[in-house]
Image: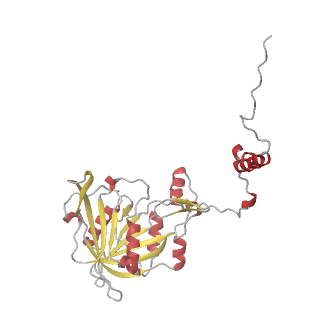
Amino acid sequence: MIRTVKPKNARAKRALEKKEAKIVENVKQALFIPGQTSNKLLHDVMVDLSALKKPQMKRFNKKNDIRPFEDASGLEFLSEKNDCSLMVLSSNSKKRKNNLTFIRTFGYKIYDMIELQIAENYKLLSDFKKETFTVGLKPMMIFQGSAFDTDPVFMHIKSLFMDFFRGEVTTLQDVSGLQHIISLTIAGDYQDGEPLPNVLFRVYKLKTYKSEQGGKKLPRVELSETGPRLDFKIGRIQTPTPDMVKEAMKRPKQLDIKLKKNVELDSMGDKFGRIHMGKQDLQNMQTRKMKGLKSKFDQTAEVESGDDEIDNDDESFVTADDIEPSAKRPKH
């Protein structure tokens, strides 16, 4: 382990603060390490893979005698020294020809490893000689095959490549930034119990053309392969321990969304609220809030009282004909 010392100046202090744990972590850096038995093909493949990862990458030119599945202390040392949580180690042997070992670390400790051997029908980035995409853009990922969601080995590969090419997490959306696609396809129809098939790694550039129907708003999209084209054969795998998985999957409490009580969102994003009310006593409920709703203005009560008065005064009721006209007073 690298011993930690107290920073002597402001520059060293800022460098140590960048390595500290954060609520929102920085983009993961990738370190490409040539092994002691690496060859020219593996060097060229790592150059092409590092071009897809730029600028969050570092690449060594000097060979290192590291055997990850036997002694991983050297990888942990390089991970902490270079502040890289993703590593790719190249090696070549008679048993494992043209082998790339993809490694992830957590807390500068080995999290998981997987070996992917390059098949013979490869094609490098320089063999296509086509226009490439802008450096630093996030790719769109496509995983073709149902085993990527069901089989543990292919789920491991999917998680690895998603973590490797994730890039910076942002809420900004710009269609012009969608320029290339990384596709991983399972060769053939894979069924449980069969030997693991190869994983086909392809990179495509997105080209848009003016369409007759949509014009510029809805262009016609075409894909052109830019490379590298690699067929990976799956080798040895080292999975993380359950305790390390639990520790790595922890989320800080500051990132947890505080849910409001009795407020829900449906699948369409509409918000619904639930109100809990106590038992209502309708007998004592006050409804006469308006002046016109008071009891003295009730029409039914007036009609009933009016009928009673007419029935009681029938004998004294007179008409206009019964009243004699008053005599005129004489003039003086």
Q: Residue at x 26, y 59 (%)?
A: 206
The quadrant in which residue 93 appears is: bottom left
> What x and y, as percent, mark residue 64?
37, 72
Q: Quadrant of the C terminus?
A: top right
Compared to residue 190, the image places residue 163 above or below, namely above
Q: Return the residue nearer the eye: 222 or 67.
A: 222
| Residue 258 image position (x, y, % from top left) | 59, 61
Whether residue 274 is visible to the viewer of this picture, yes or no, is: yes
Determine the residue positioned at 34% across, 61% down. Answer: 139
Q: Outermost residue toward the top?
A: 332
Q: Is residue 329 left or right of residue 232?
A: right
Which is more toward the observer, 80 or 50?
50
Horizontal and vertical percent position of residue 294: 73, 47
198 vs 1, left or right, is left
Q: How many marks?
A: 0
Quarter-of-image position of residue 187: bottom left
Residue 284: horizontal and vertical position, in percent? 76, 58
Residue at image location 71% in from the left, 43% down from the top: 291
Give whichever of 286, 141 is nearer the camera.
286
Q: In which image quadrant can residue 145 be found? A: bottom left
Q: Is residue 114 visible?
A: no
**Relative to the observer, which residue lies in front, 192 or 44?**
192
Q: How is the image coloured?
A: secondary structure
Side of 252 where 115 appears, left or right: left
Residue drawn at x 52%, y 75% is 244
